[in-house]
Image: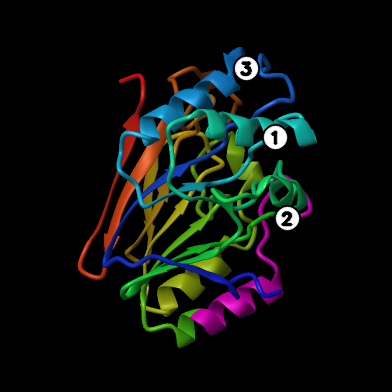
Amino acid sequence: MAWFEQAYTFDARHLKLAHFTDCHLFANKEGEYFSVNTANNLAATFEFLSTQQLDAAIFGGDITQDHTAESYQLFSELLAQSDLTCPVFWLPGNHDEPSEYAAIENTQILPYKKLVADGIEVLLLNSKGQTPAGWCTHSHLEELNTHLYETEHHVLALCHHHPLPINGYLDKHILENGPQLLNALVNSEKVKALIHGHVHNDYSQSYREMPVLATPATSIQFSKATPDWQQKNLGPAVRIIEFSRSAFKTEVIWLNA
């Protein structure tokens, strides 16, 4: 099946979305990633999102740190225990296996990679490569180019890996064919922005005037502008997005601020 073949349709002209990413769960609910209990952070994130009157939430990848099926199940359990009731969509990170996501899909965790409303759509891209660095396959880029040519909608795109350097350690795991992806998005003249995770902090860049925005992690943040791997426990953060044909607005919210 083509990546964008199936669409989830909203009966709305305006979407309020949340992007949350990089929760790095373990099989054990007490598991810690750089001394941070990632399950507790994700539970707090779900509770915050439940107060935001969202149309949907999009998880941006790296659900697992220990690569166990139980860590995916923990994500599903924490969601079910929360008050968040909107649909939750996902895209894969470098730590993830899409088949493990498929195992936890249910009436709330959904597989669609194209979200459509009146005059707008949100595309969830696959940047998972063979290594921790990102790679969009030739066939995926071809499908994306064809879809962008054919659609008449305004588009918001999301992926896991960062396509532009951040002057930091994580650049060794950048989206290796990022320029190809970015040019495809910009050349369509339909894409309002690209939003990604992976870099564990808040970044705001642009490529040929198209915004390229990073959402911090729900787990731990990585220090900016350092060649070394440095972590900061700043608490979880999410990105809230307002999207319609006439408007695109977004802000990062730090839960511990």
Which dot marks residue 185?
none
Which span is picked out in magenta? 129-147
Q: Is residue 244 above or below residue 200?
A: below
Q: Is residue 100 above or below residue 128?
A: above
Q: Which residue is mark 3?
A: 34
Q: Is residue 7 above or below residue 222?
A: below
Q: Is residue 132 magenta?
A: yes
- Which image quadrant for residue 242? bottom left
Q: Is residue 53 magenta?
A: no
Q: Residues within 10 Å of mark 2 (few under 14, many from 20)?
A: some
Amino acid carrying mark 2 in the image? Gly
In screen coordinates, is 16 left or right of 146? left
Q: Residues within 10 Å of mark 3 (few under 14, many from 20)?
A: few
The residue tagged with tag 3: helix, strand or loop? loop
Scheme by which the image is coloured: rainbow
Q: Which residue is mark 2?
A: 129
The residue tagged with tag 2: helix, strand or loop? loop
Measuring from the top left, give residue 201's x and y in whole percent.
45, 34
Q: Residue at x 61, y 58 (%)?
A: 111
Q: Does the residue at mark 1 contact the one at mark 2 (Cβ under 8 Å)?
A: no
Out of 158 and 1, give the one closest to the viewer.
Answer: 1
Q: Does the residue at mark 1 contact the one at mark 3 (Cβ under 8 Å)?
A: no
For the N terminus, the image quarter is: bottom right
Which dot marks residue 73?
1
Return the disc, 1 or 2, that comes first in the chain's sequence: 1
Amino acid carrying mark 3 in the image? Phe
Out of 219 and 111, give the one closest to the viewer.
Answer: 111
